[in-house]
Image: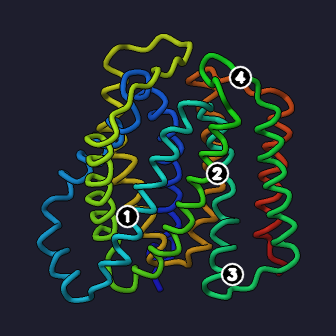
Amino acid sequence: MPLLQRIWPHLALLLAMCFWSTSYLAMRIALTALDPHSLMLGRMAVATLVLLPLWPHLWRAIRRYGQWRWLLFMGLCEPGCYFLLETNALRFTTASQAGMVIALMPLFVGLLAWFTLRERVGAQGWCGFGLAVGGVIWLTLAAAPQTSAPNPLLGNILEGLAIFCGSVYTVTARHLSACYSPLQITAVQSLVGLVFFGALHLLVPLEVTPVQLGIDLPEWAAWAAVPYLGCVVSLGGYGLYNVGVHRLSAAQAAAYTNLIPVLTLLLGVWLLREVFLPAQYAASALIIAGVLLSQWRRG
């Protein structure tokens, strides 16, 4: 197999993680002017419009392979429930803390694979899971409420629930990758997300307090974040991630999310001036250690 063909799935996943690391910051910026439902409706609308030319071919693929129930379930898990939980989480906690909670993704995927696919999870994996969960609890309890993060406990719990939904999505997308291309899966996600958040926007209007970041931003920044999230993060990130899931296992693809906590922490502290206490750095190290322990394999 040519070298480029072997490394392309890994490069795609690496770039997807870079895009996704910026999504927490972009959503926090957008939430200074928009409510969660409006933000996600705009994000999904941008992604769906860009992928509109794919739909005739995608419809033929759905008619050929069926699986529409699994496609709908996948879209409801993510972007539906995942982004509903995550966008609200970022109203209450910082981007840096939310990024650290996502370190649980590979562990949740491994547990789901054990439960649904009967993939083996040894004692080392369970120990790693325990360490990482303990680190997330420590991270949350060590967080002090501040103007930009009024309720980190609630925010981190919502982010944890979002990660569970994302893990279900990863396993489901791996199942569907046998029939559908990464772009087709991404297009379905965008359309389901558009309908999901469109319905929420109409049926459940929100009146929420805008996020206060404590830094000066231009007025256009919040609005510019919406097409950035729709094109770069949703299309670019999910398209590249689905390429990796298509070529590799669900657990291998999910392992790349280990990069998101580190990148998000660095970007949040650097760009948004988010405060991370010494105990939270120690808790973050415990999370990463637990994830690495759960995935380390002896040669």
Distance in Å between CA atoms under marks 2 and 3: 19 Å
Residue with the mark numbered 2: 160
Q: Earlier in the sequence, mark 1 or mark 2?
A: 1
Between circles 4 and 3, the one closer to the viewer is 4
Residue linked to disc 1: 75
Residue 114, label in figure: 3
- Quadrant (top left, top right, bottom left, bottom right) of the C terminus: bottom right
Q: Is residue 277 above or below residue 87?
A: above
Residue kind at label 4, given as amino acid type: Pro
Q: Amino acid at mark 3?
A: Trp
What amino acid type is highlighted by mark number 2?
Answer: Gly
Q: Secondary structure at mark 2?
A: helix
Residue at the spot 29% in from the left edge and 78% down from the top edge = 68
User: Considering only vertical position in the picture, is 204 above or below 16?
Assistant: above
The Cα atoms of the two marked residues, 1 and 2, are separated by 19 Å
- Badge 4 is on which residue? 145
Q: Residues within 10 Å of mark 4 (few under 14, many from 20)?
A: few
The amino acid sitting under disc 1 is Gly
Q: Is residue 134 above or below residue 223?
A: below
Residue 255 lies, in percent from the top left, at 64, 65
- List x then y, in percent, for residue 258: 66, 55
Could you tell whether 140 is left or right of 213 in the image? right
